[in-house]
Image (spheres, rainbow, N blue to C red):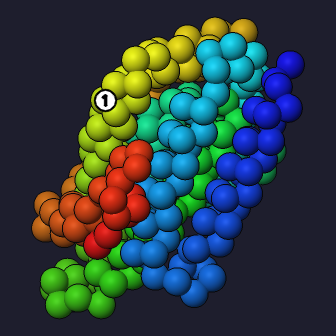
Amino acid sequence: MSSPSHLAALDKLKTRIQALRGKTTANGCTEDEALSAAAKVAELLDRHDLSLSDVEIRETPCEQISFETFRKKRIPLDDCVGAIAHFCDCRVWREKNPAGENRYVYFGLRSDIEVAHYLTELIDAAVRAELGRYKTSADYRRFRHQDRHLANASFSFGMVVSIGDKLMAMKAARDKVNDGAGRGLVVLKSAVVDEEFCKLDLKLRASRGTGRTVSMTAYEAGGSAGARLTINPGIGADPPAALKR
């Protein structure tokens, strides 16, 4: 069983995450503010993990949390959830809910999957917001009406690929800082999650690659939108970790 101090720390972290979750475009703030919260919650997660003993980490049960897409077809996030899961030291798979709609299931330590779900919400909102801006641009209006669906998909694809690359780079930087603590925290957490994941005995299959038609003009515009999001993570960063546009 987890120690009382561990549970108290976890509850405190969850409260902070819930407060940051309120900073979304749906509640009136900008994507910049919402994405700044994403980098901040990564710092909180690292502080939480480093406060735990190896025994507490080994005794922490793994859990699942789902992000519903409310879509039966694949959406742009498909090309980013793997990077989100890696960033948060958890596993992810896609499955159908009872209504036949896709959902992403994150599996790992509770604090990690809470952050993964939170980042998925933020990235989904940011891509939608940036796509909305792109649709008002002169470049977008140059597309013929029948080609605009392709432009929308290409822009979103370019943006999530760019964000995914940034998350992978951000993860590498975080791991370097955490490894500097001399504990092998990343390896320990990975071993715990892998062991529990094997117990699920899921029959997962890799997604088959499909030909994708892309408008390079829109794809590059999406990539530029993602590249403008500058991530400055790090434990004890000064000023506090932020993700700015």
Task: Work out whether 229 lies above or below 183.
Answer: below
Task: Name the residue at 82% across, 25% down.
Answer: 3
Quadrant in the picture for residue 167: top left
| Closest to the observer, 23 or 224 | 23
| Closest to the observer, 4 or 104 | 4
Location of the N terminus (image quadrant):
top right
Task: Name the residue at 35% across, 54% down.
Answer: 237
Task: Name the residue at 40% across, 61% down.
Answer: 240
Decide: few, some or many residues near mark 1? Use Cα within 10 Å; few <14, some 14-19, many ≥20. few
Taking the image as shown, residue 242 lies to the left or right of residue 106, namely left
Counting from the top left corner in percent of width and height, residue 156 is at 34, 63
Task: Work out whether 226 lies above or below 91.
Answer: below
**Can I make out residue 155 in this image?**
no
Quadrant in the picture for residue 59: top right
Taking the image as shown, residue 99 lies to the left or right of residue 221, namely right
At label 1, the amino acid type is Lys
Q: How many labels sit on residues?
A: 1
Task: Name the residue at 78% across, 47% down.
Answer: 11
Task: Work out whether 101 lies above or below 5.
Answer: below
Location of the C terminus (image quadrant):
bottom left
Taking the image as shown, residue 223 lies to the left or right of residue 176, namely left
**Can I make out residue 177 in this image?**
yes
User: Residue beneath label 1, please?
Assistant: 176
Counting from the top left corner in percent of width and height, residue 143 is at 20, 81
Task: Work out whether 48 lies above or below 54.
Answer: below
Secondary structure beneath label 1: helix
Counting from the top left corner in percent of width and height, residue 47 is at 54, 41
